[in-house]
Amino acid sequence: MHRSLSDLVERLRPHLTEREAGLLHALIHQHPTVRNPNKVEQEILTSGERWADRITNVVGSWRFIIIQAFILIMWLIINAIGWALRWDPYPFILLNLVLSFQAAFTAPIIMMSQNRQASRDRLEAELDFEVNRHAEREVALIRERLDDLSGRQWDELLRIQREQLDILTRIEDLSSQLKRRFPTDDGGDEG
Protein backbone atom coordinates (compact mmCIF):
# COMPACT_ATOMS: atom_id res chain seq x y z
CA MET A 1 0.00 0.00 0.00
CA HIS A 2 2.72 2.44 1.00
CA ARG A 3 4.73 1.60 -2.10
CA SER A 4 1.94 2.57 -4.50
CA LEU A 5 1.30 5.81 -2.58
CA SER A 6 5.01 6.61 -2.63
CA ASP A 7 5.02 5.98 -6.39
CA LEU A 8 2.06 8.34 -6.75
CA VAL A 9 3.92 11.06 -4.84
CA GLU A 10 6.95 10.56 -7.08
CA ARG A 11 4.78 10.89 -10.21
CA LEU A 12 3.16 14.05 -8.80
CA ARG A 13 6.50 15.51 -7.64
CA PRO A 14 6.90 17.83 -10.68
CA HIS A 15 3.59 19.45 -9.74
CA LEU A 16 4.38 19.68 -6.02
CA THR A 17 6.50 22.05 -4.02
CA GLU A 18 9.14 20.49 -1.79
CA ARG A 19 7.01 21.27 1.26
CA GLU A 20 3.95 19.58 -0.26
CA ALA A 21 5.97 16.52 -1.27
CA GLY A 22 7.41 16.33 2.24
CA LEU A 23 3.96 16.60 3.81
CA LEU A 24 2.57 13.88 1.56
CA HIS A 25 5.56 11.65 2.34
CA ALA A 26 5.06 12.18 6.07
CA LEU A 27 1.34 11.53 5.75
CA ILE A 28 1.89 8.26 3.90
CA HIS A 29 4.45 6.96 6.36
CA GLN A 30 2.72 8.18 9.52
CA HIS A 31 0.78 5.49 11.33
CA PRO A 32 -1.70 5.97 14.13
CA THR A 33 -0.66 4.49 17.40
CA VAL A 34 -2.53 1.24 17.01
CA ARG A 35 -2.48 -1.00 20.01
CA ASN A 36 -3.68 -4.57 20.04
CA PRO A 37 -6.39 -4.72 22.73
CA ASN A 38 -5.67 -8.43 23.30
CA LYS A 39 -2.03 -7.72 24.04
CA VAL A 40 -2.83 -4.69 26.22
CA GLU A 41 -5.42 -6.73 28.11
CA GLN A 42 -3.04 -9.64 28.77
CA GLU A 43 -0.45 -7.25 30.19
CA ILE A 44 -2.82 -5.84 32.82
CA LEU A 45 -4.87 -8.89 33.83
CA THR A 46 -4.50 -10.02 37.41
CA SER A 47 -4.56 -13.71 38.31
CA GLY A 48 -8.05 -13.23 39.80
CA GLU A 49 -9.31 -11.79 36.52
CA ARG A 50 -7.79 -14.68 34.59
CA TRP A 51 -9.49 -17.16 36.92
CA ALA A 52 -12.79 -15.27 36.61
CA ASP A 53 -12.55 -15.57 32.82
CA ARG A 54 -11.80 -19.29 33.01
CA ILE A 55 -14.68 -19.96 35.41
CA THR A 56 -17.05 -17.86 33.31
CA ASN A 57 -16.01 -19.78 30.20
CA VAL A 58 -16.71 -23.09 31.94
CA VAL A 59 -19.99 -22.06 33.59
CA GLY A 60 -21.22 -20.45 30.38
CA SER A 61 -20.63 -23.54 28.23
CA TRP A 62 -23.11 -26.13 27.01
CA ARG A 63 -20.87 -28.84 28.42
CA PHE A 64 -21.34 -27.44 31.95
CA ILE A 65 -25.09 -27.05 31.48
CA ILE A 66 -25.48 -30.63 30.23
CA ILE A 67 -23.31 -32.08 33.02
CA GLN A 68 -25.13 -30.03 35.66
CA ALA A 69 -28.54 -31.06 34.26
CA PHE A 70 -27.47 -34.72 34.33
CA ILE A 71 -26.26 -34.42 37.94
CA LEU A 72 -29.48 -32.67 39.03
CA ILE A 73 -31.68 -35.27 37.34
CA MET A 74 -29.69 -38.11 38.90
CA TRP A 75 -29.92 -36.39 42.32
CA LEU A 76 -33.69 -36.08 41.98
CA ILE A 77 -34.15 -39.66 40.75
CA ILE A 78 -31.95 -41.22 43.40
CA ASN A 79 -33.58 -39.23 46.22
CA ALA A 80 -37.15 -39.57 44.96
CA ILE A 81 -37.05 -43.29 44.17
CA GLY A 82 -34.36 -44.66 46.44
CA TRP A 83 -35.79 -45.70 49.82
CA ALA A 84 -32.45 -46.52 51.27
CA LEU A 85 -29.82 -43.82 51.70
CA ARG A 86 -32.21 -40.96 51.08
CA TRP A 87 -29.83 -38.20 52.13
CA ASP A 88 -31.99 -35.39 50.66
CA PRO A 89 -35.69 -36.33 50.70
CA TYR A 90 -38.35 -34.24 49.02
CA PRO A 91 -38.41 -31.05 48.97
CA PHE A 92 -34.65 -31.45 48.32
CA ILE A 93 -33.40 -28.85 50.78
CA LEU A 94 -29.77 -29.99 50.42
CA LEU A 95 -30.01 -29.63 46.63
CA ASN A 96 -31.37 -26.08 47.04
CA LEU A 97 -28.48 -25.31 49.38
CA VAL A 98 -25.91 -26.64 46.88
CA LEU A 99 -27.46 -24.65 43.99
CA SER A 100 -27.68 -21.50 46.11
CA PHE A 101 -24.04 -21.94 47.09
CA GLN A 102 -23.07 -22.35 43.42
CA ALA A 103 -25.10 -19.27 42.39
CA ALA A 104 -23.70 -17.19 45.28
CA PHE A 105 -20.15 -17.75 44.06
CA THR A 106 -20.56 -17.88 40.31
CA ALA A 107 -22.67 -14.71 40.00
CA PRO A 108 -19.96 -12.33 41.34
CA ILE A 109 -17.29 -14.16 39.33
CA ILE A 110 -19.34 -13.76 36.16
CA MET A 111 -19.90 -10.08 37.01
CA MET A 112 -16.13 -9.57 37.40
CA SER A 113 -15.57 -11.14 33.99
CA GLN A 114 -18.33 -9.01 32.43
CA ASN A 115 -16.91 -5.82 33.96
CA ARG A 116 -13.51 -6.66 32.55
CA GLN A 117 -15.08 -7.40 29.16
CA ALA A 118 -16.85 -4.01 29.28
CA SER A 119 -13.47 -2.36 29.96
CA ARG A 120 -11.99 -4.24 27.03
CA ASP A 121 -14.88 -3.14 24.81
CA ARG A 122 -14.28 0.48 25.85
CA LEU A 123 -10.58 0.12 24.99
CA GLU A 124 -11.45 -1.37 21.59
CA ALA A 125 -13.91 1.48 20.95
CA GLU A 126 -11.24 4.05 21.86
CA LEU A 127 -8.73 2.38 19.55
CA ASP A 128 -11.29 2.21 16.74
CA PHE A 129 -12.07 5.89 17.23
CA GLU A 130 -8.36 6.73 17.15
CA VAL A 131 -7.85 4.83 13.89
CA ASN A 132 -11.02 6.32 12.36
CA ARG A 133 -9.95 9.84 13.32
CA HIS A 134 -6.53 9.28 11.75
CA ALA A 135 -8.12 7.88 8.57
CA GLU A 136 -10.50 10.84 8.43
CA ARG A 137 -7.57 13.27 8.64
CA GLU A 138 -5.74 11.40 5.88
CA VAL A 139 -8.79 11.38 3.62
CA ALA A 140 -9.34 15.10 4.22
CA LEU A 141 -5.71 15.90 3.36
CA ILE A 142 -5.80 13.73 0.25
CA ARG A 143 -9.11 15.25 -0.85
CA GLU A 144 -7.75 18.75 -0.27
CA ARG A 145 -4.63 17.94 -2.27
CA LEU A 146 -6.64 16.40 -5.11
CA ASP A 147 -8.86 19.47 -5.18
CA ASP A 148 -5.75 21.64 -5.32
CA LEU A 149 -4.26 19.56 -8.15
CA SER A 150 -7.59 19.60 -9.96
CA GLY A 151 -7.72 23.39 -9.60
CA ARG A 152 -4.20 23.65 -10.99
CA GLN A 153 -5.17 21.51 -13.95
CA TRP A 154 -8.16 23.73 -14.65
CA ASP A 155 -5.96 26.79 -14.40
CA GLU A 156 -3.50 25.18 -16.80
CA LEU A 157 -6.30 24.26 -19.21
CA LEU A 158 -7.67 27.81 -19.09
CA ARG A 159 -4.18 29.22 -19.76
CA ILE A 160 -3.75 26.88 -22.75
CA GLN A 161 -7.20 27.81 -24.04
CA ARG A 162 -6.36 31.53 -23.76
CA GLU A 163 -3.14 30.92 -25.69
CA GLN A 164 -5.07 29.04 -28.35
CA LEU A 165 -7.57 31.90 -28.59
CA ASP A 166 -4.70 34.38 -28.91
CA ILE A 167 -3.13 32.25 -31.65
CA LEU A 168 -6.48 31.98 -33.45
CA THR A 169 -6.95 35.74 -33.16
CA ARG A 170 -3.48 36.34 -34.60
CA ILE A 171 -4.14 33.86 -37.41
CA GLU A 172 -7.42 35.62 -38.15
CA ASP A 173 -5.67 39.01 -38.17
CA LEU A 174 -2.93 37.69 -40.44
CA SER A 175 -5.54 36.14 -42.69
CA SER A 176 -7.41 39.47 -42.95
CA GLN A 177 -4.17 41.30 -43.69
CA LEU A 178 -3.34 38.77 -46.40
CA LYS A 179 -6.81 39.13 -47.92
CA ARG A 180 -6.45 42.90 -48.00
CA ARG A 181 -3.03 42.69 -49.56
CA PHE A 182 -3.87 39.97 -52.01
CA PRO A 183 -7.55 40.24 -52.87
CA THR A 184 -9.13 37.25 -54.54
CA ASP A 185 -10.60 37.43 -58.03
CA ASP A 186 -14.11 36.35 -57.09
CA GLY A 187 -14.58 39.58 -55.15
CA GLY A 188 -16.17 38.04 -52.10
CA ASP A 189 -14.98 37.35 -48.63
CA GLU A 190 -14.64 33.74 -47.68
CA GLY A 191 -14.72 33.20 -44.10
Image: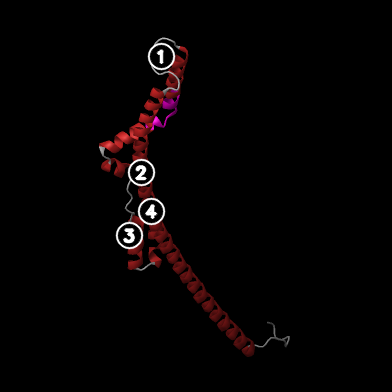
Q: Identify the amino acid type marked 4.
A: Val
Circle nearer the viewer, 4 or 3:
4
Q: CA distance from mark 1 to mark 2?
A: 42 Å
Q: Are marks 3 and 1 in contact (CB under 8 Å)?
A: no
Disc on the earlier residue, 3 or 2: 3
Circle nearer the viewer, 3 or 1:
1
**Residue 101 x, y percent position in the rendering:** 35, 29
Q: Tag on residue 115?
A: 2
Q: Tag on residue 103?
A: none
Q: CA distance from mark 3 to mark 2?
A: 40 Å
Secondary structure at badge 3 equals helix
Q: Is residue 17 magenta?
A: no
Secondary structure at badge 2 equals helix
Q: What residue would you read off at disc 4?
A: 131
**Residue 63 x, y percent position in the rendering:** 43, 25
Q: Which residues are magenta?
A: 57-66
Disc on the earlier residue, 1 or 4: 1
Disc on the earlier residue, 3 or 1: 3
Q: Identify the amino acid type marked 2.
A: Asn
Q: Is residue 143 left or right of residue 161?
A: left
Q: What residue would you read off at disc 1?
A: 86
Q: Is residue 144 left or right of residue 186?
A: left
Secondary structure at badge 1 equals loop
